[in-house]
Amino acid sequence: MKGDTSKVKRETWARIFGLFVLAACLVLTSRPALAFKILEPAEGAKLRSGATVATHVDLGKDSGIVQVRYYWYGEQDDRLVEQDDATATGSIVAPVALIGLSDHRPPFGGPLLVPKDGIGPMRLLAVADISRGRLEKRSIFDEILVQVEPHAALTSIEFETDKPLQLGRAGQSSAFGHVDSLGKVFELPVVGEFTDGVTRRISSPASGTAYQSSNQQVIKVLPGGLLQIAGNGKTTLTVTNRGKQAELHVEVNVNDEPNQPPVADAGTNQTVKAGTKVKLSGLKSRDVEGEALYYSWSQVRGSKLAMLDVNSSEASFLAPIVSEKRTYRFKLRVTDKKGADSVPAFVDVTVEP
């Protein structure tokens, strides 16, 4: 009997302990997130272009939020929102897709229109403006990546450029940035017409586009939909997407002095504390011929930061105040004195409170 009594007691205590653990888990999961976070749409969600989706955020432990601004970007777009739109002189400011206020349902959220011309991976950036009086104003953000697809079929695809395209002395000497030369890297705009009547830019392989060059010794196809001048002569570029195809005849006539493209190195990923000065180093970038390099830094993820020395080997910025760790991504391109470009290099900086 004593053995049975002990067994019953052990089972009773085991059930009590189990209930205690369950209750603790429920308390923990019911607590608000520590950081400002986009709850809807979810990370990786598949959305339809032109559709309206519900937007919902968790404010976390941040107080004093007065509004939340929402912005859409392509996955690798440089175009970012300024922290203070009024001071965005000379820069490109993305249009606000939605401003969420406290009296909206849900608070600081609401119906959000997916861009009608959206296609492929897109980033949704939510920037919460915080005010604690005239002397303390700042913003925090969260960012998710979603997949946008049109509910329409592709009817035609086309290069949106002169036809035939001439690069170099015989044609557009500076059509895509700087003077055409061996090793120059560029993108060609490609658009698609869809059955819903919307024209969408589909230059990126992420939107289903693939490129092919009939002569890689003239135009070389690089990853990410980038093209590079490799030599003089003629080639035919073919672009395909969703079973549709278009061709572009290209003639290159540039200075054929041998020149190898430089290599960009944006340094290693960093983790820093809020309020510290962050230095981005491209000093390990190199040129095969040992020539001097021109640098170009840009930001491609996170709410926009004020960067210094973006055309130097070392750019810098002040790490912003954050409630929880947030990741910012930066892109570096280098060009040698003869005009040859590198492919982009990327570096992430994670900022902690």
Image (tube, helix red, strand yellow):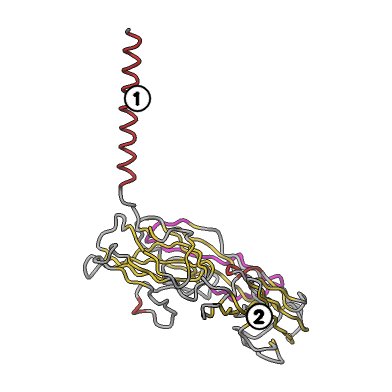
| Residue 137 inside the magenta-drawn segment | no
Q: Position of residue 134 (x, y in %)?
A: 22, 70
Outermost residue toward the top in this view: 1
- The residue identified by callout 2 is 339
- For the record, the magenta segment spans 271-296
**Residue 14 marker:** 1
Question: In the rendered image of this protein, does residue 122 appear above or below residue 339?
Answer: above
Viewer-side residue, 292 vs 123 = 123
| Residue 293 inside the magenta-drawn segment | yes
Q: Label 2, secondary structure: give it.
A: loop
| Circle 2 Cα neighbour tier, 10 Å, few/some/many (<14 / 14–19 / ≥20) | many
> What residue sits 32% from the left and 43% below the top?
28
User: Would you say 55 lies left or right of 156 here?
Assistant: left
Mark in the foreground, 2 or 1: 1
Quarter the N terminus occupies: top left
Three-letter code for the amino acid on which mark 2 is drawn = Gly
Quadrant of the rendered image containing residue 23: top left
Quarter the C terminus occupies: bottom left
Viewer-side residue, 97 vs 94 = 97
Evaluate whether residue 314 shows in this view. no
